[in-house]
Image: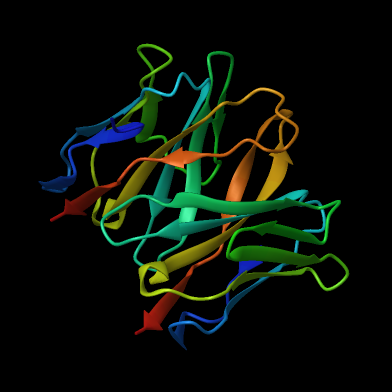
Amino acid sequence: DTAVSQTPKYLVTQMGNDKSIKCEQNLGHDTMYWYKQDSKKFLKIMFSYNNKELIINETVPNRFSPKSPDKAHLNLHINSLELGDSAVYFCASSQGGTSGGTDTQYFGPGTRLTVL
Amino acid sequence: DQQVKQNSPSLSVQEGRISILNCDYTNSMFDYFLWYKKYPAEGPTFLISISSIKDKNEDGRFTVFLNKSAKHLSLHIVPSQPGDSAVYFCAARVLYGGSQGNLIFGKGTKLSVKP
């Protein structure tokens, strides 16, 4: 059983298109995240979300929006795709709440997005 | 500005020897540090962590050391095994907006363990 899954694994699309990446976790976690790993290999937080609040990294363009239909899912919608959006996007989840600093994030396998 | 730095992009070690991966940070507000391991085409997986109130945490072959005054942590793997070959990410947590802290990652160090 995959704890955190993402679909699709690979996504190739044209500039200007709108696309979505889906993420599901079966760990019963309260908090989910989206990360971007760019060409320089940095893993950077884009969003963290639980059923109470959405925290957005201020550097993320508003073309990116997370959508959570329920606690187990956090999908990433990207509008008007640009060349610079090409990257690997990782979803993650954690128990969240007050866990004394031992809150471990579990990552999905990643989605490699290529914008042509 | 990189708050978490892994200055060695790669490290090669002989099987059975010790692997030492280093990480430096700049933000004195970090209160929790983690190491993640990543194989190609997979997501990072949690390896070991340490709270800022400790200076050492050990789990089997993996030990993390924290030197707060130097803002430096290291991961020791002994003995190293070929299956340890992967990219290792150092990460630190900073409290943000009162919600669960977000992780700040380093750029990673690619470890190759040769038989």
A94 w.r.t. B3: above or below: above
Give the quadrant of residue A34.
top left
Q: Which of A11 and A73 is in front in this view?
A: A73
Residue placed at 83% from the left, 73% from the top?
A: B70
Q: In this view, does A17 lie to the left or right of B11?
A: left
Q: In this view, does A34 lie to the left or right of A19?
A: right
Q: Can residue B1 be seen in this view?
A: no
Residue placed at 54% from the left, 40% from the top?
A: A57
Q: In this view, does A100 lie to the left or right of B115?
A: right
Q: Which of B20 and B99 is in front in this view?
A: B20
Residue B115 in the image: x percent, y percent? 34, 85
Q: Can residue B44 be seen in this view?
A: yes
Q: How many labels does the image show?
A: 0
Residue A41 in the image: x percent, y percent? 40, 65
Report the quarter where the N terminus of chain B lies.
Answer: bottom right
Residue B22 in the image: x percent, y percent? 63, 75
B10 w.r.t. A53: above or below: below
Give the quadrant of residue B99.
top right
Q: Is residue B25 left or right of residue B79?
A: right
Residue placed at 40% from the left, 59% from the top?
A: B38
Q: Which of B19 and A98 is in front in this view?
A: B19
Residue A28 in the image: x percent, y percent? 46, 18
Rendering colour mode = rainbow
B55 w.r.t. A97: above or below: below
